[in-house]
Image (cartoon, rainbow, N blue to C red):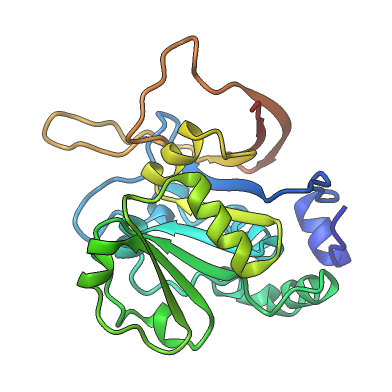
Amino acid sequence: MLPLPPSLTRRYGGELRFPPADRPWVFANFVTTIDGLVSFALPGRSQASLVSLGHPADRFILALLRACADAVIVGAGTLREERKALWTAEEVVPELASDLASLRAALGKPPHPLLVFVTASGNVDLRLPVFATGEPVLVITTTEGSARLEKPPAGVDVQALERAPRAREIVDLVAQQTKGRLLLTEGGPAVLGQFLRDRMLDELFLTLAPQLAGRSAEERRLGLVEGIAFDPDDAPRTELLSVRRADDHLFFRYRIRR
């Protein structure tokens, strides 16, 4: 059980627990429309907040999970869509900054989790605000991708692999950096697909937003999982741990059966 301040416990509707484990525990947080899409994929209008409708409860869950995490893992595609993001808890609910900081202090964690960006191509703009904070950032890429990157600013560590990073390699590198065990991935759907393919995902926090986006041959939109297709015998199975409701939004927590 995590030592949530009373205000966070009330807002979450109870305690938040992660099982004890002698290995990194990987959990994902996503929001989808009723028809399972994570982005409208329109120029300048592909942010997750347009899917969630900016609902305060969704922003709270996002902030709470970031506050618990030792590292936040993000794909380069999501980084390119959220160019101004700093990926901190207080960024999404600034009114709870003090309580979120108290939670991290009670957990014995540094003020912010390690930020991890995964890019096989190296197509990452190191001039974005998130790389200028001085906070530790890890970029995991390939040898070719590393050659494309500009000289990283202070605090940014680049780890290059010979081929596109696999989920297990990502987890191992992150665990070495943080010495912690709670690893949060926020996207995108291709990264989620990699973690599911390699059986490296333990839990999924999923917000179901009350809208339908649709897709067409002309407007290809991303679903929750991309880059991998399972057959019926191999599809990951889940256990429903909890369901919460705020207005017309539903908040599911699933454990992935490894």
Image position, residue 137 (x, y; %): 48, 75
Kindly identify the residue that appears in the image at 27 percent across and 74 percent down: 125
For the C terminus, the image quarter is top right
Is 76 placed left or right of 90 in the picture? left
Kindly identify the residue that appears in the image at 74 percent across and 77 percent down: 101
Image position, residue 50 (x, y; %): 38, 53
For the residue pair 96 and 253, the one nearer the viewer reads as: 253
For the residue pair 145 and 66, the one nearer the viewer reads as: 145
> In the figure, residue 220 lies in which quadrant?
top left
Image position, residue 98 (x, y; %): 74, 80
Is 135 placed left or right of 19 in the picture? left
* Residue 122 visible in the displayed image: no
Image position, residue 10 (x, y; %): 83, 57
Is 125 placed left or right of 106 in the picture? left
107 above or below 254? Answer: below
* Residue 196 visible in the displayed image: yes
Q: Residue furthest left?
A: 218
> In the figure, residue 131 lies in which quadrant?
bottom left
For the residue pair 246 and 74, the one nearer the viewer reads as: 74
Tally the numbered discs: 0
Kindly identify the residue that appears in the image at 48 percent across and 37 percent down: 210
33 above or below 141? Answer: above
Q: Which residue lies furthest to the top in this view?
A: 233
